[in-house]
Amino acid sequence: MAPPPSQVVSPFVSLILRIVTLICLLISLILLITVDGTALLPDYGHTKVKFKDVQAFKYMCAAIVIGIVYSLLQTTFTVIQINSGSRFGGDGFVYIDFYGDKIISYILINGAAASFGFTQDMRDLVDLLGITGFANKVNAAAALCTLGFLFTAILSILSSMALPEKA
């Protein structure tokens, strides 16, 4: 039987990283859902454009929401660990931390990449329609989502240090 995993990283470091991740994702979500633009379409005139008009932006929104829910859950578990001195769910929970951080980080970077890719591919059309400000705000939301990915990836690395060593 393997010895219990050692606490290599302080739970305070994890808590700070989880809170920063949560803040980045919350700001990203607020920015994304509040952004709108007015496109000038020939034959149609002025048309409102929102994030929900583009599949890539809706995908990023879903990724951000999933990241926020996971971050809230893990932040709660980390606070419980700090208060009680023991890990919520026992030592078997280190695997959920490790794999959860990995999966969520991949979801976040996929959402950000989809958004960046769409705005890059449609740059000429965005300029033609006059919604450059809209695209720039969506890119800012994607940048914050990317920061959320980076912090979650760092947490994944830190959580890997708590995994029990296999002989």
Image (tube, helix red, strand yellow):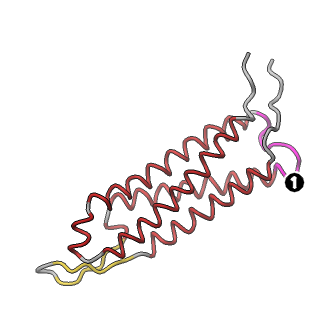
Amino acid type indicated by mark 1? Asn
Q: Position of residue 27 (x, y in %)?
A: 56, 69
Quadrant location, the C terminus: top right
Residue sitting at x 30%, y 75%: 131
Give, as a single range, the part of the protein colored magenta.
81-91
Q: Residue furthest top?
A: 167
Q: Characterize the magenta stretch by its predominant secondary structure.
A: loop
Magenta region includes residue 146: no
Q: Residue furthest left?
A: 43
Q: Position of residue 46 (x, y in %)?
A: 22, 83
User: Mark 1: few, some, or many residues within 10 Å (few <14, many ≥20)?
Assistant: few
Rendered location of residue 128, percent (x, y): 20, 73
- Identified at 45% across, 71% down, the residue is 33
Identify the residue at image location x=88%, y=46%: 85
Residue wearing tag 1:
83
Q: In which quadrant of the rendered view does residue 133 lie?
A: bottom left
Asked if residue 88 lies in the magenta stretch, the reply is yes
Residue 1 position in % (x across, y down)? 81, 17
Vertical side of 100 occupied by 78: above or below: below
Indicate left or right for 78 with 23 as reference. Answer: right
Q: Nearer the viewer, residue 86 or 117?
A: 117
Q: Is residue 164 above or below residue 14?
A: above
